[in-house]
Amino acid sequence: MPELPEVESLRQILARSIVGRTIVAARIGRLPLRRKSPGNFGARVRGRKIRRVERRAKYLIIDLDGSDVILVHLGMSGSLTCRDADFDSSEFDPRHDHIEFKLDDGNRLVFNDPRRFGIVRVVPRDSLPALKELRGLGPEPLSAGFNPGYLAERARGRKVAIKNLIMDQKIVAGVGNIYASEILFRARVRPTRSAGRLKREELERIAEFTPMILRAAIDGRGTTFRNYRDSEGRPGTFADRLQVYGRAGEKCYQCSSPIKSVTVGQRASFFCPKCQK
Ligand SMILES: [Zn+2]
Protein backbone atom coordinates (compact mmCIF):
# COMPACT_ATOMS: atom_id res chain seq x y z
CA MET A 1 0.00 0.00 0.00
CA PRO A 2 1.46 3.40 -0.90
CA GLU A 3 2.58 5.39 2.13
CA LEU A 4 3.48 9.08 2.46
CA PRO A 5 6.87 8.83 0.68
CA GLU A 6 5.30 7.14 -2.35
CA VAL A 7 2.55 9.77 -2.49
CA GLU A 8 4.99 12.66 -2.05
CA SER A 9 7.27 11.21 -4.70
CA LEU A 10 4.27 10.98 -7.05
CA ARG A 11 3.31 14.57 -6.19
CA GLN A 12 6.77 15.79 -7.18
CA ILE A 13 6.58 13.98 -10.52
CA LEU A 14 3.10 15.36 -11.23
CA ALA A 15 4.20 18.86 -10.25
CA ARG A 16 6.76 18.62 -13.06
CA SER A 17 4.52 16.98 -15.64
CA ILE A 18 0.96 18.31 -15.34
CA VAL A 19 1.08 21.76 -13.69
CA GLY A 20 0.10 24.44 -16.21
CA ARG A 21 -1.80 21.98 -18.40
CA THR A 22 -5.52 22.30 -19.07
CA ILE A 23 -7.91 19.36 -18.79
CA VAL A 24 -9.73 19.09 -22.11
CA ALA A 25 -11.82 15.99 -21.41
CA ALA A 26 -12.49 13.37 -18.75
CA ARG A 27 -13.45 9.76 -19.34
CA ILE A 28 -14.93 7.60 -16.59
CA GLY A 29 -14.42 3.81 -16.50
CA ARG A 30 -17.15 1.24 -16.28
CA LEU A 31 -16.81 0.10 -12.67
CA PRO A 32 -17.30 2.65 -9.90
CA LEU A 33 -14.74 3.23 -7.17
CA ARG A 34 -16.00 2.48 -3.64
CA ARG A 35 -17.10 6.04 -3.47
CA LYS A 36 -18.79 6.92 -6.74
CA SER A 37 -17.57 9.84 -8.78
CA PRO A 38 -20.47 12.26 -9.26
CA GLY A 39 -22.13 12.41 -12.65
CA ASN A 40 -21.09 15.99 -13.34
CA PHE A 41 -17.41 15.16 -12.77
CA GLY A 42 -16.46 15.73 -16.41
CA ALA A 43 -18.25 19.04 -16.67
CA ARG A 44 -16.60 20.35 -13.52
CA VAL A 45 -13.05 19.63 -14.62
CA ARG A 46 -13.28 20.29 -18.37
CA GLY A 47 -11.47 23.48 -19.43
CA ARG A 48 -9.79 23.82 -16.04
CA LYS A 49 -6.11 24.57 -15.77
CA ILE A 50 -4.01 22.65 -13.22
CA ARG A 51 -2.39 25.24 -10.99
CA ARG A 52 -0.58 23.13 -8.38
CA VAL A 53 -0.34 19.61 -7.03
CA GLU A 54 -0.30 19.48 -3.25
CA ARG A 55 -0.38 16.76 -0.64
CA ARG A 56 -1.98 16.39 2.78
CA ALA A 57 -1.19 13.11 4.57
CA LYS A 58 -1.70 10.50 1.82
CA TYR A 59 -4.11 12.66 -0.20
CA LEU A 60 -3.08 14.41 -3.38
CA ILE A 61 -4.84 17.70 -4.02
CA ILE A 62 -4.82 18.75 -7.67
CA ASP A 63 -5.62 22.44 -7.53
CA LEU A 64 -7.59 23.75 -10.52
CA ASP A 65 -8.26 27.31 -11.56
CA GLY A 66 -11.76 28.31 -10.52
CA SER A 67 -13.13 27.08 -7.21
CA ASP A 68 -12.58 23.30 -7.32
CA VAL A 69 -9.81 20.83 -6.55
CA ILE A 70 -9.48 17.15 -7.39
CA LEU A 71 -8.86 15.04 -4.29
CA VAL A 72 -7.06 11.74 -4.93
CA HIS A 73 -6.27 8.86 -2.59
CA LEU A 74 -4.49 5.83 -4.02
CA GLY A 75 -6.17 3.42 -1.60
CA MET A 76 -4.61 -0.06 -1.63
CA SER A 77 -3.65 -0.40 -5.27
CA GLY A 78 -4.30 2.88 -7.06
CA SER A 79 -1.87 4.54 -9.43
CA LEU A 80 -1.92 7.82 -11.28
CA THR A 81 0.12 7.71 -14.44
CA CYS A 82 0.77 10.06 -17.28
CA ARG A 83 0.43 8.38 -20.67
CA ASP A 84 1.99 10.34 -23.47
CA ALA A 85 0.86 10.69 -27.06
CA ASP A 86 2.66 7.45 -28.00
CA PHE A 87 -0.05 5.57 -26.17
CA ASP A 88 -2.90 4.54 -28.39
CA SER A 89 -5.97 6.41 -27.08
CA SER A 90 -7.95 3.19 -27.33
CA GLU A 91 -5.62 1.89 -24.65
CA PHE A 92 -8.07 2.47 -21.86
CA ASP A 93 -9.02 -0.51 -19.73
CA PRO A 94 -12.61 0.20 -18.67
CA ARG A 95 -12.38 -2.30 -15.83
CA HIS A 96 -9.34 -0.91 -13.99
CA ASP A 97 -8.83 2.53 -15.53
CA HIS A 98 -11.38 4.51 -13.58
CA ILE A 99 -10.75 8.02 -14.71
CA GLU A 100 -8.76 9.51 -17.52
CA PHE A 101 -8.03 13.20 -17.85
CA LYS A 102 -7.04 14.25 -21.33
CA LEU A 103 -4.66 17.21 -21.20
CA ASP A 104 -4.05 19.98 -23.72
CA ASP A 105 -0.52 18.72 -24.50
CA GLY A 106 -1.95 15.42 -25.76
CA ASN A 107 -0.95 13.49 -22.62
CA ARG A 108 -3.48 11.65 -20.54
CA LEU A 109 -3.49 11.32 -16.78
CA VAL A 110 -5.04 7.98 -15.82
CA PHE A 111 -6.20 6.74 -12.44
CA ASN A 112 -6.02 2.95 -12.42
CA ASP A 113 -7.11 0.95 -9.38
CA PRO A 114 -7.77 -2.82 -9.58
CA ARG A 115 -8.99 -3.07 -5.97
CA ARG A 116 -11.07 0.12 -6.15
CA PHE A 117 -10.37 1.42 -2.63
CA GLY A 118 -9.04 4.64 -4.10
CA ILE A 119 -10.78 7.99 -4.18
CA VAL A 120 -11.02 10.58 -6.95
CA ARG A 121 -13.43 13.40 -6.15
CA VAL A 122 -13.96 16.96 -7.28
CA VAL A 123 -14.66 19.19 -4.30
CA PRO A 124 -14.80 22.94 -3.72
CA ARG A 125 -11.46 24.20 -2.40
CA ASP A 126 -13.27 25.96 0.46
CA SER A 127 -14.68 22.67 1.71
CA LEU A 128 -11.27 20.97 2.17
CA PRO A 129 -10.68 21.84 5.85
CA ALA A 130 -14.07 20.45 6.86
CA LEU A 131 -13.90 17.38 4.65
CA LYS A 132 -14.35 14.07 6.49
CA GLU A 133 -11.13 12.70 4.98
CA LEU A 134 -8.92 15.62 6.06
CA ARG A 135 -10.58 16.97 9.19
CA GLY A 136 -8.81 16.06 12.43
CA LEU A 137 -5.52 15.00 10.84
CA GLY A 138 -2.45 15.72 12.94
CA PRO A 139 0.49 17.79 11.72
CA GLU A 140 2.53 16.72 8.69
CA PRO A 141 5.58 14.73 9.83
CA LEU A 142 7.81 16.89 7.60
CA SER A 143 6.51 20.13 9.07
CA ALA A 144 7.73 22.14 12.05
CA GLY A 145 4.45 21.33 13.81
CA PHE A 146 5.73 17.81 14.43
CA ASN A 147 8.57 18.20 16.95
CA PRO A 148 9.79 16.67 20.25
CA GLY A 149 7.69 18.99 22.42
CA TYR A 150 4.55 18.17 20.47
CA LEU A 151 5.20 14.41 20.56
CA ALA A 152 5.95 14.47 24.31
CA GLU A 153 2.70 16.30 24.94
CA ARG A 154 0.69 13.78 22.91
CA ALA A 155 2.44 10.78 24.50
CA ARG A 156 1.97 11.92 28.07
CA GLY A 157 -0.13 9.50 30.11
CA ARG A 158 -0.88 7.30 27.09
CA LYS A 159 -0.77 3.52 27.55
CA VAL A 160 -0.93 2.81 23.81
CA ALA A 161 2.12 1.21 22.16
CA ILE A 162 4.46 3.84 20.74
CA LYS A 163 4.17 2.30 17.29
CA ASN A 164 0.41 2.74 17.35
CA LEU A 165 0.78 6.29 18.60
CA ILE A 166 2.98 7.38 15.69
CA MET A 167 0.70 5.57 13.24
CA ASP A 168 -2.36 7.39 14.62
CA GLN A 169 -3.29 9.89 11.89
CA LYS A 170 -4.72 12.28 14.48
CA ILE A 171 -1.28 12.46 16.15
CA VAL A 172 0.81 12.74 12.98
CA ALA A 173 -0.51 12.42 9.43
CA GLY A 174 1.01 9.89 7.08
CA VAL A 175 3.34 7.59 9.05
CA GLY A 176 2.40 4.06 7.98
CA ASN A 177 3.46 0.58 8.98
CA ILE A 178 6.74 0.24 7.08
CA TYR A 179 8.20 3.55 8.14
CA ALA A 180 6.98 3.30 11.76
CA SER A 181 9.13 0.15 12.21
CA GLU A 182 12.11 1.87 10.58
CA ILE A 183 11.76 5.05 12.66
CA LEU A 184 11.62 3.09 15.92
CA PHE A 185 14.69 1.07 14.95
CA ARG A 186 16.66 4.25 14.31
CA ALA A 187 15.35 5.73 17.57
CA ARG A 188 16.34 2.48 19.38
CA VAL A 189 12.87 2.07 20.93
CA ARG A 190 10.84 -1.16 20.86
CA PRO A 191 7.50 -0.80 19.04
CA THR A 192 5.54 -2.36 21.92
CA ARG A 193 6.56 0.14 24.64
CA SER A 194 3.84 2.26 26.22
CA ALA A 195 4.03 5.75 24.74
CA GLY A 196 3.54 7.43 28.11
CA ARG A 197 6.50 5.59 29.62
CA LEU A 198 9.15 6.67 27.13
CA LYS A 199 11.93 8.93 28.31
CA ARG A 200 12.12 12.44 26.93
CA GLU A 201 15.28 11.63 24.96
CA GLU A 202 13.60 8.61 23.36
CA LEU A 203 10.69 10.76 22.20
CA GLU A 204 13.18 13.32 20.94
CA ARG A 205 14.92 10.68 18.85
CA ILE A 206 11.59 9.50 17.41
CA ALA A 207 10.57 13.07 16.51
CA GLU A 208 13.99 13.65 14.94
CA PHE A 209 14.20 10.42 12.93
CA THR A 210 10.62 10.56 11.61
CA PRO A 211 11.28 13.29 9.00
CA MET A 212 14.79 11.92 8.30
CA ILE A 213 13.51 8.46 7.40
CA LEU A 214 10.60 9.82 5.38
CA ARG A 215 12.84 12.22 3.45
CA ALA A 216 15.31 9.43 2.65
CA ALA A 217 12.40 7.32 1.41
CA ILE A 218 11.07 10.19 -0.73
CA ASP A 219 14.54 10.63 -2.24
CA GLY A 220 14.51 6.93 -3.08
CA ARG A 221 11.03 7.30 -4.64
CA GLY A 222 9.51 5.18 -1.90
CA THR A 223 9.60 1.49 -1.18
CA THR A 224 8.57 -0.94 -3.87
CA PHE A 225 6.64 -4.00 -2.89
CA ARG A 226 4.88 -6.21 -5.38
CA ASN A 227 3.89 -4.21 -8.42
CA TYR A 228 4.13 -0.66 -7.18
CA ARG A 229 5.67 1.71 -9.72
CA ASP A 230 5.77 5.46 -9.63
CA SER A 231 3.98 7.44 -12.30
CA GLU A 232 7.06 7.36 -14.54
CA GLY A 233 7.02 3.56 -14.31
CA ARG A 234 10.08 3.31 -12.10
CA PRO A 235 10.26 1.15 -8.98
CA GLY A 236 11.17 2.79 -5.66
CA THR A 237 14.60 2.04 -4.24
CA PHE A 238 14.06 2.41 -0.51
CA ALA A 239 13.37 -1.33 -0.03
CA ASP A 240 17.14 -1.89 -0.26
CA ARG A 241 17.64 0.43 2.68
CA LEU A 242 15.10 -1.04 5.09
CA GLN A 243 16.81 -2.00 8.35
CA VAL A 244 14.11 -4.10 10.01
CA TYR A 245 10.83 -4.09 8.05
CA GLY A 246 10.17 -7.50 6.48
CA ARG A 247 13.48 -8.91 7.80
CA ALA A 248 12.28 -11.27 10.58
CA GLY A 249 14.94 -13.90 11.29
CA GLU A 250 17.62 -12.06 9.31
CA LYS A 251 20.65 -10.50 10.98
CA CYS A 252 20.54 -6.93 12.24
CA TYR A 253 22.94 -4.83 10.15
CA GLN A 254 24.18 -3.14 13.32
CA CYS A 255 24.67 -6.01 15.79
CA SER A 256 23.95 -9.28 13.90
CA SER A 257 21.14 -10.36 16.28
CA PRO A 258 18.16 -11.90 14.47
CA ILE A 259 15.41 -9.36 13.76
CA LYS A 260 12.15 -10.23 15.49
CA SER A 261 8.58 -9.65 14.43
CA VAL A 262 5.69 -8.94 16.73
CA THR A 263 2.09 -7.95 16.11
CA VAL A 264 1.21 -4.48 17.37
CA GLY A 265 -2.32 -3.20 16.77
CA GLN A 266 -2.88 -6.09 14.32
CA ARG A 267 0.04 -5.02 12.15
CA ALA A 268 3.30 -6.86 11.68
CA SER A 269 6.11 -4.96 13.36
CA PHE A 270 9.82 -5.61 13.22
CA PHE A 271 12.57 -4.78 15.69
CA CYS A 272 16.05 -5.74 16.83
CA PRO A 273 15.90 -7.12 20.40
CA LYS A 274 19.42 -5.90 21.11
CA CYS A 275 19.48 -2.45 19.49
CA GLN A 276 16.00 -1.45 20.62
CA LYS A 277 15.10 -1.08 24.31
ZN1 LIG B 1 20.64 -4.84 16.32
Image (spheres, rainbow, N blue to C red):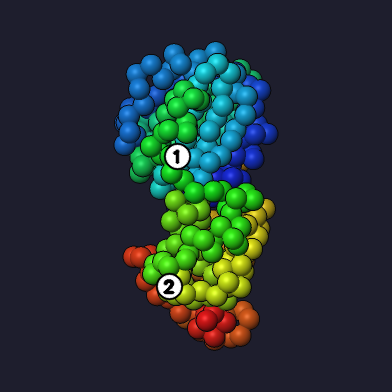
Q: Pointer 1: residues within 10 angstroms few (<14), some, or many (20+)?
A: some
Horizontal side, residue 268 vs residue 276: left or right: left
Q: Amino acid at mark 2?
A: Ser
How far is disc 1 from disc 2 in space, using C-alphas? 27 Å
Which of 26/206 is in front? 206
Horizontal side, residue 36 vs residue 105: left or right: left
Q: Amino acid at mark 1?
A: Leu
Q: How many marks?
A: 2
Q: Is residue 177 visible?
A: no
Give the quarter of the image for residue 84: top right
Q: Could you say where residue 117 lies in the image, as x and y percent from the top left?
A: 36, 42
Residue at image mark 1 = 134
Which of 141/40 is in front? 141
Q: Could you say where residue 43 lies in the image, as x and y percent from the top left?
A: 44, 13
Which residue sits at x=52%, y=37%?
A: 60
As helix, strand or loop, the secondary structure at mark 2 comes to loop
Residue contact at pointers 1 and 2, CB within 8 angstroms: no
When the figure is inspected, residue 12 is found, relative to residue 67, above or below; the finding is: below
Residue at image mark 2 = 194
Give the quarter of the image for residue 252: bottom right
When the figure is inspected, residue 176 is found, relative to residue 108, above or below; the finding is: below
As helix, strand or loop, the secondary structure at mark 1 comes to loop
Q: Pointer 2: residues within 10 angstroms few (<14), some, or many (20+)?
A: some
Which of 119/190 is in front? 190
Q: Nearer the viewer, mark 1 or mark 2?
A: 2
When the figure is inspected, residue 95 is found, relative to residue 51, above or below; the finding is: below
